[in-house]
Amino acid sequence: MSEPLLRATGLRKTYRIGVRLVEVLRGVDFAVQAGEFVALRGASGAGKSTLLHLLGGLDRPNHGDIQFRAQSLAALTDGELAKLRIASIGHVFQAYHLLPELDALENVSLPARVARLDAAEAERRARELLRRVGLEQRLEHRPAELSGGEQQRVAIARALVNQPQLILADEPTGNLDSHTGEEILNLLCELRTEHNATLVIATHDARVAARAPRVVELLDGALK
């Protein structure tokens, strides 16, 4: 088997809450191959979001190592880590995190502009992705003018605009009704195949996890 696209070894993460130290992750080992689709299951509060943030370089572990394409994230400066994220990793957040002052087209284009893509190409990609997610008639609508399902579709398009190798989706159906959630899941799977990307979905929903060829469970701070 080839070297994994992403490998985590012995990840530990502790937060201080008042005078207490809360250990969320207790020695997590995880690897995913290029093009793989993995579901990360666990109850709410189990640490799934924390793990995705570490894997995607949004936070750093207290202990352990994460390698992306055989490069240790610990060896990167904050600036280098930001460049890696914008170029190679797409995050789909449960809370969407769209910028309220920007319309759908601007929200999706933004990561491409940050990556210094030509403005015309950034807009072309954003328009195509928004068309692909069924929002070609909503390009000029701001997040407050969109439904939850529409906002999640914008967030998915934004995550894919730089054609990342790795997509990390945190409870992407958690705030949606069952019908819209199924549509979003189908869309993620289709776009992953079309873009030949690796997909890791964190979920507490057994129906979502059942779609993945491989499922791992986060329990008591470790993967089972």
Image (tube, rainbow, N blue to C red):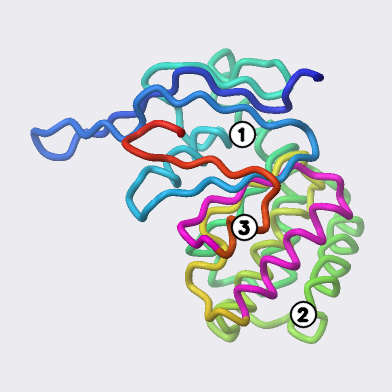
When the figure is inspected, residue 31 is found, relative to residue 180, above or below; the finding is above
Is residue 184 a member of the stretch shown in magenta?
yes
- Determine the CA span between mark 3 and mark 2: 28 Å
**Image side of residue 11 versus residue 212, left or right:** left
Mark number for residue 114? none
- Determine the CA span between mark 3 and mark 1: 33 Å
When the figure is inspected, residue 205 is found, relative to residue 62, above or below; the finding is below
Place of residue 38 in the rendered image (x, y in percent of width and height, measured from the top left) = 65, 44
**Quarter of the rendering occupied by the N terminus:** top right
Q: Amino acid at mark 3?
A: Ala
Tell me how many marks there are.
3
Upstream in the sequence, badge 3 or badge 1? 1
In this orientation, which residue lies closer to the viewer: 8 or 158? 8
In this orientation, which residue lies closer to the viewer: 217 or 129? 217
> In the rendered image, which quarter is residue 198 located in?
top right
Q: Amino acid at mark 1?
A: Ala
Q: Residue at x 66, y 27 (%)?
A: 6
Say which of marks 3 and 2 sits in front. 3
- Determine the CA span between mark 2 and mark 1: 29 Å
Q: Which residue is mark 1?
A: 82
Q: Which residue is mark 2?
A: 135
Q: Secondary structure at mark 1?
A: helix
Q: Local crowd at mark 1 within 10 Å, few (<14), some, or many (≥20)?
A: some
Place of residue 200 in the rendered image (x, y in percent of width and height, measured from the top left) = 63, 45
**Image side of residue 25 versus residue 141, left or right:** left
* Boundaries of the magenta span: 180-206
Residue farthest along the left direction in this orientation: 19
Q: Which residue is mark 3?
A: 210
